[in-house]
Amino acid sequence: MSMYFGATTWPFKWAPPYEEAILRVAKLGFKSTELTIWDTKYIEEYYTPTKNRELAQMIKDEGMVLSEIFFVIPGMGSEDATVRAKAVQEFQRVLDVAEQLGTQIVNTCTAYPFDIEFPLIFDKPLKQEWQVDLPGDRDWKKNYFDQIDVLRQFAQSCEKRNMRFVLEPHPWRLMHNAAGMLRIIDHVQSPAIGMNCDPSHLFPMGEIPHQVVYEVGDRIFHVHCSDNDGQTNVHWRPGKGNVDWVAFVKALNDIGYNGPLSIELEDVPGAAGYPGIGRVPTSSDMIDREYAKAKDFLARCCEEAGVKIDS
């Protein structure tokens, strides 16, 4: 088995419905796609059992697989035990959706400490002084292990369902680099937990993406592909930033990774995005070109690295 190319749906259409986005991804020749639950309200509004069966069949009919589903659940980093318990309950609903859709991998980012608001990294290059107001009068160690407990319960639930739970590194959050991922693995003590390795989030945190691949090794269960210049976590087309993609795919091959290279282009011409930061919720046709170019570029990188891709 070898690696293959996949694509996320949300840069084509930020929020549900995702049927048109699935068809566009399939038309571009990708072998896998991803869906997302930005808010658990979408479980009632969109991801019903009937809809999930329809989506699963659509993906199969288009010759693709659903490589993972990304989800957002608030409260994971809360100091309130009741709020954290609610997050664990909500996770069970996410797993129900994932099973109905036919994927074995669920993905999320860890919380910010204490669930407090952090500034957007997009603004960093524009600020003369970078300020973050952090609480010095709270128990940071307890907050860390409270969140570890939530992650452990998530992972244990995945073990019972023969599923995998991946964490995506993200600026300022509990896990934003290889060391943070390895520390979580040590504390959670579950074979179900691993990383969704995303260079566009690792690179601005000072990491060399292919070094992270070697450090985290066989706990990399899924991969996102987008590029940037290391200043913010923008998601450019691979080849437009400074990530060494030949070295990255070679490292993945060296550790025996055989999952998707799932392209995620949130900051390219025509992309849809979160309207709260000035983006539009629906993409234009320009993004089809960006995804096609990204796939072609990564195919050349794989060829140069001597990495076989399942086409």
Image (cartoon, rainbow, N blue to C red):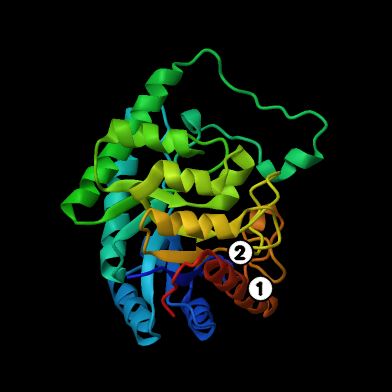
Callout 1 touching callout 2 (CB < 8 Å): yes
- The amino acid sitting under disc 1 is Glu
Near mark 1 (Cα within 10 A), the count class, few <14, some 14-19 or many ≥20, is some
Is residue 206 depicted above or below 101 in this figure? Answer: above
State the CA–CA distance, disc 1 to disc 2: 8 Å
Which of disc 2 and disc 1 is earlier in sequence?
Answer: 2
Camera sees residue 128: yes
Number of callouts in the render? 2
Residue drawn at x 56%, y 63% as measured from the top left: 264
Task: Please tell me whether residue 204 is drawn above or below residue 1 in the rendered image.
Answer: above
Dot 2: within a 10 Å radius of its alpha carbon, few (fewer than 14), some, or many (20 or more) residues? Answer: many
- Give the farthest residue toward the top: 137
Of the numbered discs in the image, which one, if any, rests on residue 265?
A: 2
Location of residue 43 in the rendering, given as x and y in whole percent from the top left corner: 37, 62
Which quadrant of the view contains residue 184?
top left
Q: Is residue 169 visible?
A: no
Q: Which residue is mark 1?
A: 290
Find residue 283 and report its image quarter. Answer: bottom right
Question: Label 2 sits on what residue type?
Answer: Leu
Kindly state the secondary structure of the residue where label 1 is placed.
Answer: helix
Taking the spot 28% from the left edge, 70% from the top edge, the residue there is: 102
Residue 178 rendering spot, x and y as whole percentages = 46, 38
Q: Looking at the image, which is closer to me, 48 or 285? A: 285
Residue 155 image point, x, y percent: 27, 44
Residue 156 as seen in the image, left or right of residue 220: left
Q: Position of residue 162 (x, y in %)?
A: 19, 56
Query: Which image quarter holds the C terminus?
Result: bottom left
Q: Is residue 1 above or below residue 166?
A: below
